[in-house]
Amino acid sequence: MNKKDSVILNENITFPEVRCVGDDGTQYGIITIDEALKIANDEGVDLVLIADNAKPPVVKVMDYNKFKYQQDKKQKEAKKKQKQIEVKEIKLSCKIAQNDIDYKVKHAIEFLQSEKHVKFRVFLKGREIAEPEAGIDVLNRVWDMVQDYGTKDKEPSLEGRYVNMMVLPKRDDKKKH
């Protein structure tokens, strides 16, 4: 089997002897592949190879299309229940004016209140790269303004030409003061 989801059915099963199991749990025992195919044909369903490396290999008499449909349905349900984490990025600079910080923080607070993660990034231009403390200072000023709405993932850190700080939304139980 080259793909993880490719399945060997009916006449494509080449083992001479197999352990055959019914869809309802019926044990047919170790029988020849021809007998297993006859059982599947009599019931009007497929013979599906379940475990090809068992001794002897295990096959199941079942309606493969119904089985595949139920598997797909389960996967879709699991996907629906998965929570997508959305990260909003807010870019700043070392020489940013206070009113610009206020405006960007207002948006950051809205994102945090709607359960989104916010990544603040201060871009270091030219010689500012030699003094990343200026970027850290900007992020600390921003943090003072958003700390009531979120929790700091970790301290501001230098990554290339950016100083980054991730802020996560506060949990619901802490939000209601």
Image (cartoon, rainbow, N blue to C red):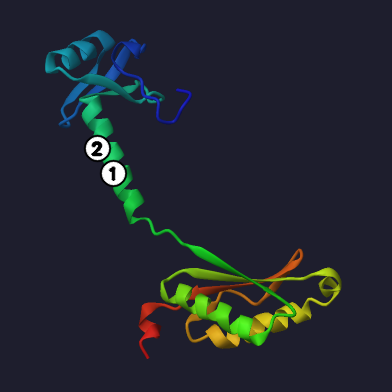
How far from the left and from the top, in percent, is residue 51?
Answer: 36, 27
The answer to which quarter of the image holds residue 23 is top left
The answer to which quarter of the image holds residue 56 is top left
How far from the left and from the top, in percent, is residue 106?
Answer: 51, 80
Badge 2 is on which residue? 70
Q: Is residue 110 left or right of residue 34?
A: right
What is the residue that sits farthest to the left in this orientation?
43
Q: Is residue 128 left or right of residue 163?
A: right
Q: Is residue 127 left or right of residue 75?
A: right
Q: Nearer the viewer, residue 139 or 61?
A: 139
Give the residue displayed 82% in from the left and 74% down from the top.
128
Q: Nearer the viewer, residue 168 or 74?
A: 168
Mark 1 touches mark 2? (CB < 8 Å): yes
Give the residue displayed 74% in from the left and 78% down from the top.
94
Q: Nearer the viewer, residue 43 or 170?
A: 170
How far from the left and from the top, in percent, is residue 68?
Answer: 28, 31
